[in-house]
Amino acid sequence: MLDSAKRVAEKKDWIKGATGDWEVVLGLEVHAQVLAKSKLFSGASAEFGGAPNDHVSLVDAAMPGMLPVINEFCVEQAVRTGLGLKARINKRSVFDRKNYFYPDLPQGYQISQYKQPVVGEGSVHVDVDGRAVKVGIERLHLEQDAGKSLHDQHPSMSFVDLNRSGCALMEIVSKPDMRSAEEAKAYVTKLRQIMRYLGTCDGNMEQGSLRADVNVSVRRPGAEFGTRCEIKNVNSIRFMGQAIEYEARRQIGILEDGGSIDQETRLFDPKKGETRSMRSKEEAHDYRYFPDPDLLPLELEDAFIGKIEASLPELPDGKIARFMTDYGLTAYDAQVLTAECASADFFEQVAKGRDGKSAANWVINELFGRLNKEGKSVDTTPVSAAQLGEIVDLIAAGTISGKIAKDVFEIVWTEGGSPAQIVETRGMKQVTDTGAIEKAVDEIIAANPDKVEQVKDKPTMLSWFVGQVMKTTGGKANPQAVSGLLKAKLGI
């Protein structure tokens, strides 16, 4: 793993300023909405969407006398995430009140966790341009989400939608271990992937179920940390990269002009591609944290934690290593196939009992390529794993060539059906009769004496002859047999 000393020695990710090199220091607070049917302290629906204030209970609206009741499943999901991050699970944690006033926070405080979170230190390992980077996790705590203020419904009024109020959030706080926008993007991507594998957060950033506060500071390499600014509520990995790049250069410009950085909270404007000041950055004491008197400390038993740990699925890093070992895949192919749990499962169905590399090639290049082009996913693919596996079998048996296989894939994609039956009924079988192939080869050689003379001095022209024979046979000739016969007859 890349440590600070090695970073300085390698001069990785430094930004060249007018007066020398600068290093960016990044720490992230990722807010992940717990994948649960109901909210953290009420039975109201946590489903996305719905008419404004349709998913609101009396607890969410902070009606007098309403008391919060902890959702055990949300606690389980937080512990599950902590275990997936190889983090310490705290058997005793406390819910606190984080006090601040905002129109979409009806209680006047947010129930969160401060000094005693449910999950302690852990780590996430990411790969950035071939470099292994370890990002430390400082904590994961549970808290309730706020509502949403709507400012574009009326020219002179703002409205409040409390549908999101009280939804369970996991705030995952990293250590300041990242040194570039690429590392931060890779970290959030990996975090999102892990939680999707675990089933604890759907990671839909466009719906706001995963968003990040990005803390950015700059320093001379090896110097003390600089003053940080927090970019609030970034809900796109691409925008995150842009925000970090802009903010780092903004701070460098101020420092090189002899100024100082004000600690503040900023927003990123994706239309202008810049950050702008929102408010001065609050410190913990500004929120006047104190234990919530309506909620007892949360105490977890070993059996509760053990049961969750026993149910954990195979996570991305383990799956990548297994794919490389069991199927002989490259690290890159294994990473592509395991990016989503559904993609990995689909590949394993195709590869079962078959050559792993051939299966991976068809899944990645043909299937994924077409899915991306059509805007579809593995869940909505017209070609099933069984159908794609059948195509791989037909190639392996020599029944069809790779070129014919692509034609079969196209037919299955548009019309469906069994690949084997399609090949049989449409006469698409590969020609393996050496006599028929030899006849086609002889005809091409006889018709092109000038090319025959040229190929003796330029052997790479053999591919032209192969192409002509394949064209003559309608692409049905076995390419290896064609190449072998041509080499023998042309003396190559």
Image (cartoon, rainbow, N blue to C red):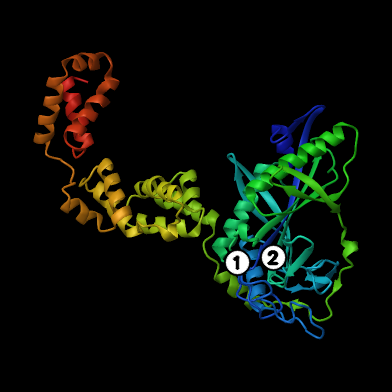
Q: Which of 333 and 343 is in front in this view?
A: 343
How many numbered marks have been drawn onto this rendered protein structure?
Answer: 2
Mark 2 is on which residue type?
Met
Q: Distance between the residues labelled 2 and 1?
A: 10 Å
Q: In this view, does 253 lie above or below 143?
A: above
Residue 179 visible in the shown view: no
Quadrant of the frame with the C terminus: top left
Q: Nearer the viewer, residue 437 or 257?
A: 257
173 and 101: which one is in front? 101
- Quick one: SS at disc 1? loop
For mark 1, what is the residue?
A: 200
Report x, y in % for residue 24.
76, 40
Q: Which residue lies furthest to the bottom in this view?
A: 65
Could you classify mark 1 by the number of other residues whose Cα lies within 10 Å: few (under 14), some (14-19), or many (20 or more)?
A: many
Horizontal and vertical percent position of residue 268: 74, 48
Q: Of the residues under marks 2 and 1, which one precedes in the sequence? A: 2
Q: Classify mark 2: helix, strand or loop.
A: strand
Which mark, by number, is residue 170? 2
The answer to which quarter of the image holds residue 194 is bottom right
Q: Which residue is drawn at 59% across and 69% down?
A: 309
